[in-house]
Amino acid sequence: MLRSFVILTYMLFLIACGGEGVANNEPSSDSVTSDTVGTADSQPVLPTIPQPPHMAGVVYVAHLEDPSLMSYRIDGDYIEPGPILTMTSYSHDLALDGYNDRLYVAHDANQTVEVYQLSRPASPEEPLTPPLLLSTINVPDIPRFLLVDPHHDRLYIAAFPPGSTVSQTHLYIYDVSSPATPAPLSPNYFTVPVTYSWALDPVRRILFVIDNNIGSLHMYDVSQDNPVLLPNGPLSLRNLYPQENQSSFSITGPVVDPANARFYAARNQGALSETVVLQYPIGIQPQGVSYSTIGDHSSIFSIPDYFDVNLPIDEFPNLLGGFGVLHDRYANHLFLISNAWDGASMSSLVVPMLGNLTPGSGCGDYSGFGCWYTQYTNGAPGNRQLTEGAACVDGQHKVVVGTSYNVNNPQDAGSLHAFRYDDSLTLSPLLTQDGNNPITDGSPVAIGCH
């Protein structure tokens, strides 16, 4: 019923192509014209939604306080550490392309992005081969965040200019169809708002950028490798989520579900934290045509989640700061990574949610459904931990994985917290064979499930 409503909605919004993009502060124009729409003799190619990639059952973790790239196997009965690779520098982010078995790692200290080829063990018994370095991209600015489009071989690098004051994000776009020789698609960078929260719909080729300084969402058409702001934007998220408290408002950890044309993220605002769910027109434009012919910022509407923040805080299971949302493309499940009060202190947890945004069974730890990030020793649960937000999900092996760090000494070892789940979203801890959490190095801030 919802999908029928959305289809009807975007059919009513046939909006002319337009918008604006910036490269080195110079305006650009939308290059899509009526000539690209096609004729009866030459119909354009209509993209389809790709199936999820086959998962290898491997997790990769990079660290802010250590140059190691650690790997873990989740394709067996236990979670087990794999090979450790020492990279050239500490890491700030990574992006994993499961279709082409590639890993991209951003090193802000030496202003590089490294490109790795990943292996696929044929069975849980077969050893895992360490990642193979294919190339290194030297970035003129400081690379902070990465996105990869596996279907069009595009790598998006969000970089900040050196200096303490940052007024804009420099966006670099690379063609990585030949991963040994990545090629920049423009001699200059493009500018988008300062962001640490962004996501990509690789089917419709829409880049979602959150400007947390003013609480707005910017949607860019990147189909021509030249970001063009869609009409009627940006979208004020503060108008959609207007509730106020003593905590600042921010949107973090976004993810896009192309099959259902939904944007998910975490609202991080103390007891007003919740899941942000935005629906945009589900239509897919033909190749070479701007998405603005289907929808734009004015076509988006929000969908309420389970956490009703309009109620008094003692009348619903309120969270204490969301980090991000994971999407299982195999079963359309969601996992909200957040903090909450555990009765004695603030701890991190994962909240599983069905596609209709109601919580699954979980572990029953928090309000009957959450799962705390708990430290296990020889199978016995111990203290609960805090995360910096890094997490990923393997929908094929049905495992969700998050990280925690040493709050008192971030440079010391952290931990991995993995949960196996079933179709009802009942979760149970996935530990090593001796009943422990695998360890990480200092500040595990980036993670990818392969």
Image (cartoon, rainbow, N blue to C red):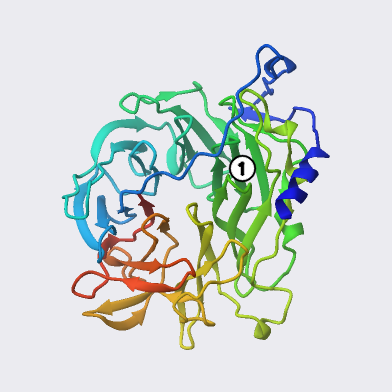
Between 119 and 220, the one lying in front of the other is 119
> Residue at the spot x=77%, y=50% of the render?
5
Between 432 and 191, the one lying in front of the other is 432
Residue 131 percent across, percent down from the top left: 24, 42
> Residue at the spot x=45%, y=73% of the render?
426
Instruction: Name, please, the residue furthest toward the right.
Output: 12
Residue 110 percent across, percent down from the top left: 33, 39
Between 268 and 315, the one lying in front of the other is 315
Instruction: Name, please, the residue furthest toward the bottom.
Output: 343
> Residue at the spot x=44%, y=75% of the render?
371
Residue 22 percent across, percent down from the top left: 63, 29
Helix or strand or loop: what does disc 1 sit on?
A: loop
Between 50 and 271, the one lying in front of the other is 50
Classify 204 as above or below 52.
Answer: above
Classify 432 as above or below 147.
Answer: below
Question: Which quadrant, please, contains the N terminus?
Answer: bottom right
Horizontal side, residue 91 vs residue 249: left or right? left
**Crowd band around label 1 with a 10 angstrom C-alpha radius: few (<14), some (14–19), many (20+):** some
Classify 284 as above or below 411.
Answer: above
- Quarter of image, res 441: bottom left
Residue designated by label 1: 193
Q: How many numbered circles does the render carry?
A: 1
Residue 397 visible to the viewer? yes
Residue 344 percent across, percent down from the top left: 46, 88
**Amino acid type of disc 1?**
Pro
Residue 215 visible to the viewer? no
> Residue at the spot x=20%, y=45% of the render?
130
